[in-house]
């Protein structure tokens, strides 16, 4: 059994699940080992920092921590303990997940949960990832991001052939 811990800013409302998304925001999760940077593979990430991102601002939502993570050996467990499904379930409600690497089966589980995985080629600070996301939102988002925005109800502008 995988234990999941959620850390969020203290409010006057007690919540066990992920807080409501800010209107018009894209919910972004970042795979991290230290809550400072996008510096982890999906399977070995000890934490995920979750933010609501708009073209003008980002707000910390919560950090989700896991005790049981992959050792990146490339070997599957024989006892059948699934470490991926609890992570996907904990990230439900997110639209994007930034990580250094992700395996095919994990990516498929995320996509089926309507979470778009995005691999970054090297570690970046969380601020850099959020800033680049904002730049994509402000300028012409790539087709895959326009699809995510439409499914999330964030963008009311329909993509045109002139984009």
Image: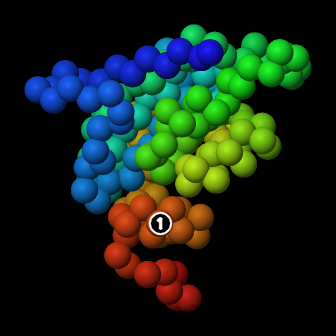
Q: Identify residue for label 1.
A: 151
Residue 153, percent across and down?
A: 37, 66
Taking the spot 35% from the left edge, 48% from the top edge, the residue there is 53
Say what secondary structure mark 1 lies in. Answer: helix
For label 1, count other residues whose C-alpha is less than 10 Å away and answer few (under 14), some (14-19) or many (20+). Answer: few
Residue 163, percent across and down?
A: 52, 81
Taking the spot 53% from the left edge, 68% from the top edge, the residue there is 147
Q: How many marks?
A: 1
Q: Quadrant of residue 149?
A: bottom left
Taking the spot 38% from the left edge, 78% from the top edge, the residue there is 157
Q: Is residue 101 left or right of residue 91?
A: right
Residue 154, percent across and down?
A: 36, 64
Give 87 or 53, whichever is nearer the viewer: 87
Q: In this rendering, is residue 100 above or below 23?
A: above
Residue 38 appears in the picture as rendered: no
Quarter of the figure with the N terminus? top right
Give 45 or 128, whichever is nearer the viewer: 45
Taking the spot 49% from the left edge, 19% from the top edge, the residue there is 4
């Amino acid at each position: 059994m995988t234990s999941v811990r959620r850390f969020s800013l203290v409010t006057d409302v007690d919540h066990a699940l992920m807080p409501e998304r800010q209107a018009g925001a894209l919910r972004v999760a970042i795979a991290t080992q230290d809550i400072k940077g996008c510096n982890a593979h999906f399977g070995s990430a000890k934490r995920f920092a979750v933010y609501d991102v708009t073209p003008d601002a980002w707000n910390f939502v919560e950090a989700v921590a896991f005790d049981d993570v992959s050792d990146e050996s490339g070997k599957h467990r024989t006892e059948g303990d699934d470490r991926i499904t609890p992570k996907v379930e904990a990230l439900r409600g997110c639209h994007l997940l930034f990580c250094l690497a992700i395996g095919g089966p994990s990516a498929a589980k995320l996509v089926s949960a309507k979470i778009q995985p995005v691999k970054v080629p090297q570690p970046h600070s969380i601020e850099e990832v959020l800033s680049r996301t904002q730049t994509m939102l402000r300028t012409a988002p790539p087709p895959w991001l326009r699809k995510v925005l439409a499914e999330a109800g964030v963008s009311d502008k329909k993509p045109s052939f002139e984009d």
